[in-house]
Amino acid sequence: MSDRDKNGCDSQEDVPVPVEVWPELERAECLARGAALKWASGVFCRPEQLERLGQYRKRESQRTSSIHSRLKSVVQSYLEGVDWGLEQLREARTELREVSHALQKTVVESRKNAEGITALETMRELSINHCKLLAAVSNLPRIYSVRTMIQETERLVESRRLLEAHARLMELEVWQDEVLLQLRGSGDEDKELVQNYFSGVGRLVDALAKELWAVVASGLALARQNPTPFVSAVRIVEREEALDRSLLAERGPTADHSRPLPPGRPRCWRDRFFKVMEEAVSARFRSVSYLHTRGPGLAGHLSALQHGIMGDLDTVRHLLEHCVPPHYHLTQAYLRACHRCLQAHLSQVSGWELESGEIFAVLNWVLHIYNSPEMMGHPDIVPEMEMEELGPLISQEGLEQLQNKYVHSVRKSVSEWMQKALEVELTDWQREQEPDVDHEGYYHTSLPTIITQMLEENARVALMISEALRDQTIQMGLYEMETLLNRFREALVEFGKDHRKDQSTNNNKFYLHYLLACISNCIILKTSTESLQQQLSSRSSVRFSRSPLGHLAALDRAVRKACRLVMDHLLMEMQPYLQNLMSRAWLAQGDVIPQVCGVLERHWDLFNHVRPPCQQRLREECQWLTVVEYVRALMQKRLICRNAEERRQLAQRMAQDAQQLKEHCQGMEGEGILTEGNPVDLLPVLADFIKLRDPGMLTLEVSGMVAKYPDISEEHISALLDIRGDVSRDVRSSVLDLLEQIAPALPAGYRPIFSDILVPAPSMPFCLPTAKCA
């Protein structure tokens, strides 16, 4: 036999085997060659480095041998793992073959047993029928008596023999549960048949519960007459609670959960007991409507609630508490129920359109009466329940809304009353008699009394609720007074206009008297409002959009307007006499100031009926007005001096008028005369300026005048120079230049007088010819 036959295969020399080359391998080889060439070119870049070629060759051969050995080790371990995996697959195949044979034997045996099971089905059906028949025979006497017992129990319920009825009901429920338990595992049709047969039991439960809760709801009334039904109801509730606990305990962690709870269980009648009691408490509120509590009816309703709740609490504490187990804490439960019902009821009441009196009744009841010793703060009730646990009857936000509604309602009422008071005041102004005089001799009308009493009464009533509401009410009243005073000032303006229109007819003889009464009224109102402001709490958090002192500014504006009208009236009476000032007749006779003093005296006497400090202010204004009008007449240049004699006469007359005016005012009353800055002192100064003989000294005179009266202007000085009639153009120029250079600032506290005196503009000469047109 040849070598080829011995080996059983051709040698590689005879049959070439194609070698597959991987593209990754080829690419890796190319990269390796490139890296080697790059390394060699870097190492052997110089000839002397070729001497170390042997060393490099030896090192690289050692590295190559190490890599080959590691590769062989990895391949060897991989092959060993493959061999172990193949061995495991062979063992698994053997085990699967054995399991398959065992399953085939099991299938054969099960087919043999199936024939025996078919024979046992008949026995199973007979056993089930036997159990049903046994249950029917054992329960047959009870089943026949179910209808009768249901009818008897219904009669017991109707006659309110609740304990007996509940005992019969419990017996019927036990029968129903036993029958259903025996039918466990039966079909749904059997269970439905039993439940339909015992359907009367469910109706009995509903009927008994209805009567039971009717008794509980009327427990307060029964406790005063015959508490026996209520006690029976509580005993039934406790029986049901015990049954619920026992049934739930049977279904604990170690119980048989396959046994279902009886129908309608658990009933939780104890919880229902407290709900029914709360519904009975709320029943007294459900019948209350908006129409039944309008006006005083709301206060009466809240009072009735107070007495009704306290009476019921006494009944609960002294009677019903002894009819229930101690763990019921019936008084606490009743208190909680009352509180919740009151919260809901007062929330409904707060949403109604309430007037101020009704809101006051609600706030007073909530904040004071409810927590007072007469109600929930009673010493016998406080230990039962902490009010902090119950919470407030009305939330803080609800209280703020109620207070805002109260203030808004009071504001509307105050505005209407103030308008009516103002209308009465305007009517009083037209009376043909003097205003009323108080015990101090001052004029007044009914306006300040009405306003003050109204604001003080509202503040007093609001304080009964809280200081915050009092502060809010006072602020509201002050702002309404500001509005009233603005209308009051407008009425004064119209009063003055009407008086000027009717001046010729002289219809209103007491015009000035009522103006003075208005001034006194404003002073009274200012005192009253300052007293109200002092009542404001320092902790007040009331914030308003307008300034809290606006009413004082309105008062000041009204007083100023009234004083201005008084001065206008004074000027109107003095005007006929003032027109004669600075005339040749006046210069010769000097009879104007005595007539003016007569007018001042009449007004001065009336000013005694004005309250201080306006009394002195009016007197000061009279002097001021008189001097201003006197100087204004002088500035109109009605009298131009032609020589030194006329200047002397004019200065002398002015000095005499000033002295006469001052003496007359001092004679009327010294307290009303200005001690400092008296305007009458201006007249002698002007007289000295006019009578100065040397015009060259006018510069010095003007500097002194400017130092004393810094508001004097160039127009005033020019008018005085014109009145003298002897001032040259150079002197005039130097005087005016000096005035322009000085120009002092007004000192603090100085009241300008020349600012009120206007100098007429000089008339410009007409340049065109006055010939008539063709």
Image: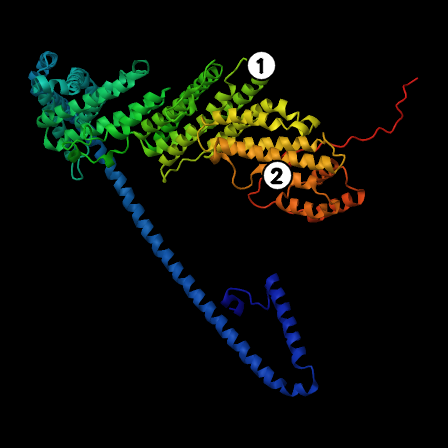
Disc 1 crowd rating (10 Å Cα; few below 14, some 14-19, many 20+) is few
Question: Does residue 221 sit above or below 654 in this rendering?
Answer: above
- For mark 1, give the secondary structure: loop
* CB atoms of marks 1 and 2 within 8 Å: no
| Label disc, if present, on residue 266 of the rendered structure | none
Asked which quadrant contains residue 438, the reply is top left
Please give the name of the residue rendered at 42% of the width and 28% of the height, measured from the top-left corner. Answer: 525
Q: Which residue is mark 2?
A: 682
Question: Does residue 331 sit above or below 219 in this rendering?
Answer: below
- Residue 289: where, in percent of width, then height? 30, 15
- Residue 644: where, in percent of width, then height? 74, 38
Please give the name of the residue rendered at 27% of the width and 39% of the height, measured from the top-left corner. Answer: 107
Residue 226 located left or right of residue 648: left
Q: Residue type at mark 1?
A: Asp
- For mark 2, give the secondary structure: helix
Alpha carbon of mark 1 to alpha carbon of mark 2: how far? 36 Å
Q: Nearest the camera: 526 or 351? A: 526
Q: Which residue is mark 1?
A: 502
Disc 2 crowd rating (10 Å Cα; few below 14, some 14-19, many 20+) is some
